[in-house]
């Protein structure tokens, strides 16, 4: 029987996960089935969908918005990075019938930065813009790369302080950002509507890489703003999407996909 996987989301029709995972399967020389599964936005409906999928022999599942918190509460055990993120995006069935919850978002970011973009995070000063779930999910994997510093900045400073205290890192309000950083990562939702975080353009003067977790067919407003103010390199988050999927695939199948050719293929499909 062909191994079955899925991604749970709402909405989910736009998800690129099936294409991405089929690319990984081609690298492995394996046959898999990977679906999209819609659920209503309640813990009960999501949980019912997950239980039904695994009862029917599902071998693994990804979880996207808005279900990562529901998934965290549903599973019986969590990896360290899932506990740090407070959210689960990967469901891994165990031999005893329970589910292990993992969060591969941060590893996906690190794989894109270090493997694909070949950016060394060691001893670098990192600025994270935003203090929501996207930021929380990546702090621990970034810290494991031994940067010189990680700073969180957010429009609502209290949220930045609260998140920074969880990880013993620095927090600043946007208006107090007055130094340059080696890497600036936009984890706000602003790029969805082409808005830019209210930060001084001066922070990009010494920036080696300005990275937007959002991805699109064209450079995002944040990427354009950073490039206009002397950031040396910009990137969107398509590689993070592929990287987190690769980390999930590795958990399920003990095979480590190469992400660069998949990023290139998905990018070509997006811009065709």
Image (cartoon, rainbow, N blue to C red):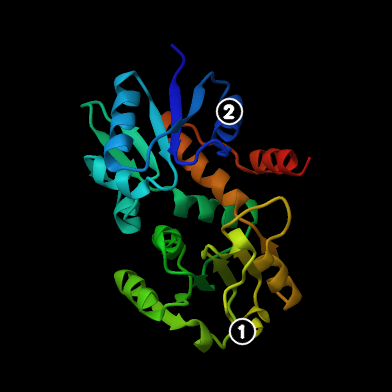
- Does residue 40 appear left or right of residue 233 in this picture? left
Vertical comparison of 139 with 116: above or below: below
Where disc 2 sits, the SS reads helix
Total numbered labels: 2
Element assignment for label 1: loop
Q: Can you give x and y, in whole percent of width and height, for residue 128 in the image?
A: 50, 70
Say which residue appears at 42% left-offset and 77% top-offset: 156
Label 1 neighbourhood size at 10 Å, few (<14), some (14-19), many (20+)? Answer: some
Label 1 or label 2, whichever comes before in sequence order: 2
Q: Relative to the observer, which residue lies in front, 2 or 271?
A: 271
Residue 198 placement: quadrant: bottom right
**Mark 2, residue position:** 22
Quarter of the image where one finds residue 24? top right
* Residue 148, placed above or below residue 134: below
Give the residue furthest to the top.
1
Measured in 3D between alpha carbons, the distance from the residue under mark 1 to the one under mark 2, in whole angstroms, is: 42 Å
Coordinates of residue 218 in the picture (x, y in percent)? 73, 55
Residue 268, how many percent across, how many down? 75, 41
Circle 2 packing at 10 Å, graded few (<14), some (14-19), many (20+), is: some
Using the rendered image of the protein, determine whether residue 195 is visible from the camera's viewpoint: yes
Q: Nearer the viewer, mark 1 or mark 2?
A: 1
Residue labelled with disc 1: 200
Quadrant where the C terminus sits is: top right
Residue located farthest toward the right when viewing the structure as drawn: 272
Q: Is residue 251 visible?
A: no
């Amino acid at each position: 029987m062909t191994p079955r996987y899925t991604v749970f989301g709402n909405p989910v029709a736009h998800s690129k996960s099936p294409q991405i995972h089929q690319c990984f399967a081609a690298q492995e020389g394996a046959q898999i089935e990977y679906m999209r599964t819609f659920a209503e936005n309640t813990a009960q409906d999501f949980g019912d969908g997950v239980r039904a999928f695994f009862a029917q022999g599902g071998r693994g599942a990804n979880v996207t918005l808005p279900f990562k918190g529901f998934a965290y509460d549903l599973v019986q055990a969590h990896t360290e990075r899932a506990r740090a993120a407070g959210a689960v995006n990967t469901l891994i069935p165990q031999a005893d019938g329970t589910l292990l919850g993992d969060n591969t978002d941060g590893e996906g970011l690190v794989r894109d930065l270090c493997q694909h973009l070949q950016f060394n995070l060691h001893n670098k000063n990192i600025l994270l813009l935003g203090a929501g779930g996207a930021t929380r999910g990546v702090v621990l994997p970034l810290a494991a790369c031994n940067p010189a510093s990680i700073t969180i900045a957010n429009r609502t400073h209290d949220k930045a302080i609260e998140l920074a205290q969880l990880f013993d890192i620095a927090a600043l309000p946007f208006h107090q950002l007055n130094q340059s950083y080696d890497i600036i990562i936009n984890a706000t939702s602003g790029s969805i509507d082409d808005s830019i975080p209210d930060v001084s353009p001066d922070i990009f003067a010494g920036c080696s890489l300005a990275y937007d977790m959002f991805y699109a067919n064209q450079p995002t407003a944040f990427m354009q703003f950073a490039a206009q103010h002397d950031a040396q390199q910009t990137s969107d988050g398509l590689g993070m999407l592929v990287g987190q999927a690769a980390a999930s695939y590795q958990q399920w199948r003990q095979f480590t996909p190469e992400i660069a050719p998949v990023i290139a293929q998905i990018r070509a499909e997006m811009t065709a």
